[in-house]
Image (cartoon, rainbow, N blue to C red):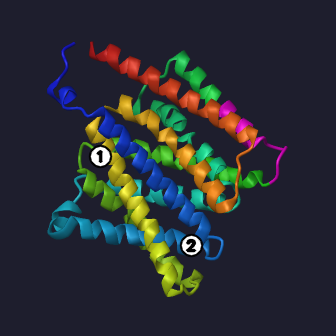
Amino acid sequence: MQPSPQDASDKPLAGVIWVMFAMLWFVSLDTLAKYLMQEYPLIQVVWARFFFHIVIVTALLGKKRAAQVKSRSIKFQIWRSCLMLATTSLFFTGLQFLPLATATTLMFLSPIFVTVLAIPMLGERVGMRRWVGIAIGFAGAMVVVRPGIIEMEWSMVFLIAAALSHALYQIFTRGVRVHDGSMTSLFYTGLVGALVMSLLVPFNWQPVPAPQWPLFAGLGLAGCVGHLCFIRGFQCAQASVVAPFNYTTLVWAVLSGYILFDEIPDRWTLMGASLIIFAGLYIFHRERLVKQNQSQ
């Protein structure tokens, strides 16, 4: 097959760099949240993540905000926003009690959940080889969780639920991308979270000293910039090139956990992470082969 004009304009290195920066911003968000939750209520931290997200995106839209916030698929956008609120709330809940690297590892289940959920929701077919990859991924999760062996396993349930919610968020994002632009979706990503948490946070408010307000604003900034870098990465290069670099999140998470919280992932977490990452990359590879065969 001859490369299309879009293929010829790809910038793989730029795409990889953008995605790696996105992962750094996402881990910065998680790190800030874990730090703030040592002193402030969960609801207040979740509120800041979404409130400042909306403030920043609204400022970025500028004079075009009225046109950009008009969605041609408002139902999908509201569902996406609800799922992002659920994902963030569940993830932050588990993150309070688990090392950053462990929480990050369990979120790697999202691509595996996407593959499973795509069968009933998108009508996609999954072959035996991809089912093997799914089984390996869940085995990796069990290595990390080790049910009945370690303490606080209930907190890991929140992380697994967050991975499932995030998988649903990705599926709805697939559906909405043909209707709305990236900035419209970025706005709606935080809309429900900002509205709902603004109603709840007055009942869970703890006064914030002036020097710490930049940290709260940093939650929204990190989430917003992370999403923008992620979008830019997929605009510069094909998904098959940049998607595997999502797993660099674990590198940043291990470094942040060690430097700021004195956390060192145990061998079981690293072993489980290796299995989950291998399974995710294998499933992605099989999906790419299927798409190539369909296009020929």
Query: Is 195 inside the magenta-drawn segment?
Result: no
For image coordinates 54% across by 34% down, the residue present is: 112
Q: Residues within 10 Å of mark 1 (few under 14, many from 20)?
A: some
Tag of residue 277:
none
Q: Which image quarter holds the N terminus?
A: top left
Query: Is 146 inside the magenta-drawn segment?
Result: yes
At label 2, which amino acid type do we have?
A: Ile
Q: Which image quarter holds the C terminus?
A: top left
Q: Along the horizontal axis of the image, is 99 left or right of 233?
A: right
Above/below status of 274 relative to 76: above
Q: Is residue 76 visible?
A: no
Residue where numbered disc 1 is placed: 232
Answer with the quarter of the image where residue 273 lies: top right
Q: Residues within 10 Å of mark 2 (few under 14, many from 20)?
A: many
At label 1, which amino acid type do we have?
A: Arg
Residue where numbered disc 2 is placed: 43
Q: Secondary structure at mark 2?
A: helix
Instruction: Specify the segment rendered in magenta.
Output: 138-151
